[in-house]
Image (tube, rainbow, N blue to C red):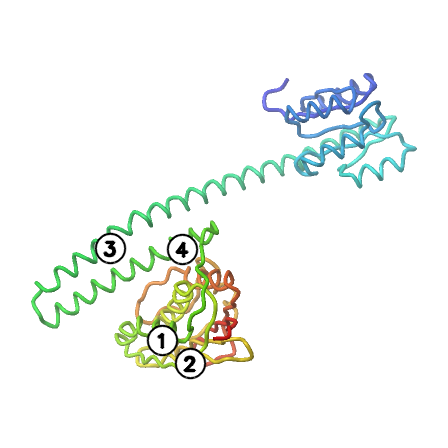
Amino acid sequence: MTANAARVLVVDDEEANRDILATIVQALGYDAAQAEDGEVALGMVESEDFDLILLDVMMPQVNGIDALKQIREKKDRQQLPIILITAMSAVDAMVNGLESGANDYITKPFNFKEVRVRVKSLMQMKKLYDERQRLLNTMQHANELKNRLMRIASHDLKNPVNNLSMVVQLLEPAVPDNAENKELMGMAYRYIEVMNSIIEEFLDLDVLKDQEVTYNIKPFALDEVVLASLTDYRAAADRKGIRLTADLDSATIEADEDRIGQVIGNLVSNAVKYSHPNTTVNVTGHIKDDIYELHIMDQGDGIPAHEADALFQPFGKLSTEPTGGENSTGLGLWIVQQLIQAQGGTVGVNLEYTGGADFWLKMRIVED
């Protein structure tokens, strides 16, 4: 047996045929194992690894077609290629075998050149498949490692950032009250807010990808949640001279109030980030039939149409940048989409809006 050589299983009830095929296989540089019938072959496939099977159709006990069907229940054409061996006149058997999952066939009496070409061709395909699987496994392992490190880092950073926020709050009364110090304290609070935002988004990414989110579904007033989100981001808007306005119909929906608040807060936060200073963010919410349609419209640079597909992708990058140097992880809109779709809603962007960006959210209302 050649070290690390690919393995071929030759299955035929005639020893002479097995020896001929095994000799051809070995001459190509592969290892050859033999089985005298389908039943023995199935046992070998169950306990050993093979890269290719040469399988005779006409055999006693378990014939080639039955053995082929049983193998295909566990391994597809790429995982384990199979070449059927048939008599030249057995056209129906060839067709049946190909329909049952065979990759190719050779006929008796053997044409040695044909056998070599067909075996070598499928072995090259199997080699490419194995290399692709190894690459995919390596990439999956690297991705799992990255996600695990992100999760650990996010969890481990959360407590220090919270502690830092407490320290800044405790120090603030002792800081001399002048314009320079106020600006420095404001910067400290903003940087802590940015760090918290990044950590929360990475934690949400991890939970959403693992589909571990639980939802507390109950009726609540959507317009009240929108107004609360506007209040939360009014200070950030004021720092840029941005005015927040709202024109909202009253409506009740059934969803997770905290998660919907997170969604709306994310959209409002983005509107403030991407609006130019001294402009207006307009939030409107109106009922159409039994759907509540909410729009958050900013006066920034808008969304280039050719970049729209990247909007709701994790780590999607746009040429448009926040106007005040704010942070953007590229995760916020993906999180918004996952949370909304999981609760029966939809979210999108109106690319025909020319005044900036117009993100919309639609949720079904319920009777009060």
Dot 3 amino acid type: Asn
Q: Earlier in the sequence, mark 2 or mark 1?
A: 1
User: Badge 2: how crowded within 10 Å, few (<14), some, or many (20+)?
Assistant: many
Locate the N terminus by quadrant: top right
Q: Earlier in the sequence, mark 3 or mark 4?
A: 3
Occupied quadrant, residue 55:
top right
Disc 1 or disc 3, which is closer to the eye? Answer: 1
User: Badge 3: how crowded within 10 Å, few (<14), some, or many (20+)?
Assistant: some
Dot 2 amino acid type: Leu
Separation of residues labelled 2 and 4 (CA atoms): 29 Å
Dot 4 amino acid type: Asp
Separation of residues labelled 2 and 1 (CA atoms): 9 Å
Q: Which residue is mark 1?
A: 227
Occupied quadrant, residue 136:
top right
Q: Relative to residue 352, is residue 205 drawn left or right?
A: left
Q: Secondary structure at mark 2?
A: strand
Q: Name the foreground residue: 187 vs 74.
A: 74
Dot 1 amino acid type: Leu
Q: Which residue is mark 2?
A: 248
- How many discs mark residues in the rendered view? 4
Q: Relative to residue 266, is residue 60 drawn left or right?
A: right
Q: Which residue is mark 4?
A: 204
Q: Name the foreground residue: 265 vs 91.
A: 265
Q: Secondary structure at mark 3?
A: helix
Disc 2 or disc 4, which is closer to the eye? Answer: 2
Is the residue 256 above or below the residue 305 in the image? above
